[in-house]
Image (cartoon, rainbow, N blue to C red):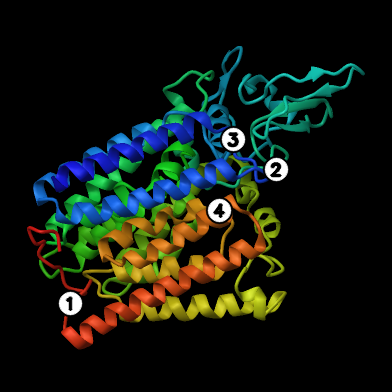
Amino acid sequence: MRTLLTAVTLAAMVVLTILSVSTLGFFDPGDFGGILWYTVALWALFVLAALLVRRVPTRAAIVLIIAGSAVLSGAALAGPPSTSTDSARYAWDGIVQNGQAQQGPVDGVSPYTYVPADDALAPFRTSWLFPAAVNDSDGHPQCAESTRVERTVSLPSFVVICTTINRPQVHTIYPPGAELYFAGVRFFVPTSAAYWPFQVAGALLAVGTSVALVLAMLRRRINPRWAVLWAWSPFVATEAVTNSHVDALAALLLLLASLFVARGAERSARPLTTILGGVLLGLSIAVKLVPVIGVPALLRRHPLRVAIPAVLTFALLYVPYVLATGIAVIGFLPGYLAEEGYDDGSRFALLSVVLPGPASIVAAGILLLVTAVLVWRRTDPANPWLGQVVMIGSTMLIVTPHYSWYALLLVPFIALSRRWEWMAVPAALTAQLLVPTLDVSRVSFALAIIVVLAGLGYRTYLKRVYRYPVASAQPVQAAPSGQ
């Protein structure tokens, strides 16, 4: 009966996911009602399913976890991206690198060389990335009335063009690891293939991460039911699959890097294990840069074995792009930081309440440095998951990014550490993405901090009063009941 109830709850999540992806249009910040209620309902079902699976027998739970991850990921493929157009830029960068011009294959072009609106790249413009403009009654070119389509001008001709690529007038922001992924995914599909290639790749990454978590938990005698925090999360289905953010690849690589580094901290491990972890860490950072915040928790036991391979891997991936375009590989990163308000401190939703302006930048830097040092000093090298959660989660709460998908890095380590209260962080990021106001951002992040502190207090109380080993540093044998 418990297994059946869990399966029914999962089925309800699948149906709601399909409905939300297939019936709702592209997200409009001025009309967030439908997607907001779908999101609330999915999170409520997710919490219910996670509680029900605790009572399901272990083998049945593992089957449900993997199957549920696959089915939910499949459901998230039911429609195009719903809250982000980033995968249009992914496709464009891949098409340009592969030389997939409309009139036939040509030499590939570095994505750092030209902006998408540059006339030099006109042969690569596909109809779904650059829909044709239509003249109005006055003979002026107009674009389709869609929040997914942007009106811009081609450079240097200044001809009006329409595009589904965001920020078409700036260079790509993505580092070489991501660009290789973009080129790889687009290499196997025609240029007419729209959003689905990266959605399928995201589904494979989501399910692969679920499998990696279950296997890691079984090896470490951690209750594998905790893997549902990633496998069944509507946040993961939305951001890794529907919106197909490359952060899912960065998260999987960081997870694998952490697993190898933790294995290398064991006395019987070979040095090559730690070195491989460093290589995976470098790959993860080369995909999105943000995984650099996962470094402090991995440097406790063998810092040089981790850091040197990571730096070399990161640098080697940059070499061909630097040779092709030089300093232009920096891309839009400085402009992005300014656009998001990190240059003047306005992006720090909580810190700016008490320290407006540049003072919040200084405070954020101090808080991040202190957190990094504490994580490095106190993390158990053989079980770095809690350190990863504290470092990544605290960074999200300090810098309060606008984009929720950055928290994909956090979820696998919440599952491994069993610190469920930190799921409040991706929930807060989702809330302030769907209701993009400063007040909602401040309230949602403040509530997330309260939940995290409440979880810490509850766990401390149990340890001191009942001497209960809740999410301790040592692995815990999974009980048949799932407790």
The crowd level at tag 1 (other Cα within 10 Å; few <14, some 14-19, many 20+) is: some
The three-letter amino acid code for the residue at tag 4 is: Tyr
Cα distance between the residues tagged 1 and 2: 52 Å
Q: Residues within 10 Å of mark 2 (few under 14, many from 20)?
A: some
Mark earlier in primary sequence (3, 1):
3
Of pointers 3 and 4, the one earlier in the residue sequence: 3
The N terminus lies in quadrant = top left
Which residue has dot 1 on it?
469
**Is disc 1 placed on a helix, strand or loop?**
loop
Q: Earlier in the sequence, mark 1 or mark 2?
A: 2
The residue at the point 40 percent across, 52 percent down is 284
For the residue labelled by badge 4, is the local secondary structure a helix, a strand or a loop? Answer: loop
Residue 403 marker = 4
Q: CA distance from mark 3 to mark 4?
A: 16 Å
Image location (x, y in percent) of residue 359: 68, 79
In this figure, which residue is indicated by the disc labeled 3?
Answer: 26
Q: Are marks 3 and 2 in contact (CB under 8 Å)?
A: no
